[in-house]
Amino acid sequence: MKTDVLVLGAGIVGVSVAIHLVKRGRSVVLVDRQGAGEGTSFGNAGLIQREGVAPHLFPQNLPALLNYARNQSTTMRFQWRALPQISRFLAQYWWASRASSYRAIVEDYSKFIAHAVSEHAPLIEEAGAADLIGKAGWMQAYRSDESYRAAREQAESFERFGLDHEALDADALRLREPGVTAELAGAIHWTQPWTVRDPLALTQAYLRLFQSLGGQLVTGDAMTLRSVAGRWEVDGAHGAMSAREAVIALGPWSDQMLRKLGRRLPLGVKRGYHMHYAPRGNVGITMPIYDEAGFLLAPMNRGIRLSTGAEFALLDAPPNLAQLDAAERIAAVSYPLGERLDPSPWMGARPCTPDMKPIIGPEGREGLWLALGHAHHGLTLGPATGRLLADMMTNQAPFIDPTPYSVTRFD
Ligand SMILES: Cc1cc2nc3c(=O)[nH]c(=O)nc-3n(C[C@H](O)[C@H](O)[C@H](O)COP(=O)(O)OP(=O)(O)OC[C@H]3O[C@@H](n4cnc5c(N)ncnc54)[C@H](O)[C@@H]3O)c2cc1C
């Protein structure tokens, strides 16, 4: 089979890239070893984080580092055995998080994430997926007066990025979310982000849009990618497929692919878990709530989804449910959570770069392109990434400056 472009990986990022390419007249085959959206894009918290101008940094102050070093925190854990292999990634992540470099990262990132909702909106409409979307925003809740005050100050400082928020003190929060029994000092309600009640269903709806525009999804193994006579070839279920161009959008598996091609980048993963719960009684929560105790609760079609914070670990190491169990113990007494709804917890891995920015653009080899490393914001930035990469691949003026996302920054 011959086509113009092979997009490897049918997560939210690959599907979004594929849509933008077919819309520009390219013939596109999406390749995945499973169904669209069944990788990391299956299990996220469903936030389209318009407000996420400041990507998650590596803690810099000593008390926070010492706390994390105990490896008991709900927010962040690590796998001891992985440390030798991930130490280079962690060191570079810590280095990029210093105030001086982090400021520049936020300046770049804020210009990209500003397009998060506006790039999803037309796709949601064309895909007929409006019933999956909430437009009421989401909340970050704080347990101490001190952290609530700091969050208010930060939210006010983000007004310069065009971000709106509402600060809710304890009483206002109780009125807004009567089911919450936690002793909370207050919350920041971000009003502009959208939320998704079933992230898998959204990626599947985008896939159907791609197919209705003439694109195809083929089962295949991306790891068979090879260059043959100036074209890129990969093995599919019904034989080899070849194209002038190929896009690596394999989420956390992109690193394996790049290593196989002889390119070593300082990539890492932050694993995360989720579990669904029935609402307790007849009250649930009206919108996603992040609790600074280190977890996020989101009302989904399936129930209330609790998603955990970061676990630095090897991609394929067995799950460690301690972080989820710890989050569940706190959440169960603070929020209206009933019984568990899933037979076992879901685990995924946020695909991370050390400087917290995705890699979008040419790989360096003729016809090979990259769309990976979206960390905490792959759902948020999938469609914006699709537009940016398609702009570059079709020689159109990119809608934002792509320089901060070039892989050459790691050379
Ligand atoms: C707990 C948790 C909560 C999160 N919450 C949010 C959130 O609220 N908002 C947000 O924006 N982001 C969130 N994220 C991050 C987001 O889910 C990811 O950034 C995003 O899903 C990455 O998408 P992707 O398309 O790059 O990767 P994936 O969705 O992982 O897609 C990669 C695809 O590649 C395929 N693949 C891998 N290897 C091969 C192979 N050899 N051959 C063929 N196919 C292959 C996989 O099957 C998969 O379908 C969260 C992540 C986690 C873990």
Image: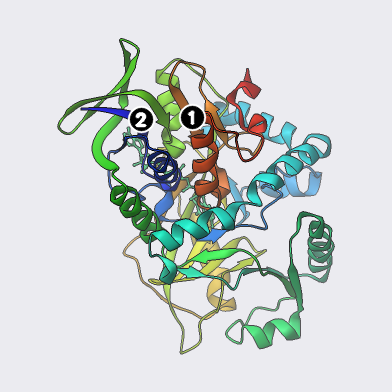
Q: Which quadrant is the N terminus positioned in?
A: top left
Q: From what the image shows, is residue 108 above or below residue 63?
A: above
Quarter of the image where the C terminus is located: top right
Q: Residue 18 in the image: state x and y as whole percent.
A: 39, 41
Q: Type of residue at label 2?
A: Val
Q: Residue furthest top?
A: 229
Q: Along the horizontal axis of the image, is 44 left or right of 355?
A: left
The answer to which quarter of the image holds residue 88 is: top right
Residue 266 or residue 48, whichever sits in front: 48
Instruction: Rate crowding at label 2 as few (under 14), some (14 to 19) or many (20 or more) other CA atoms within 10 Å.
Output: many
Mark earlier in primary sequence (1, 2): 2
Q: Secondary structure at mark 2?
A: strand
- Taking the image as shown, residue 234 lies to the left or right of residue 258, namely left
Specify the label residue 393 is tagged with. 1
Q: Is mark 1 within 8 Å of ligand 1?
A: no
Q: Are marks 1 and 2 in contact (CB under 8 Å)?
A: yes
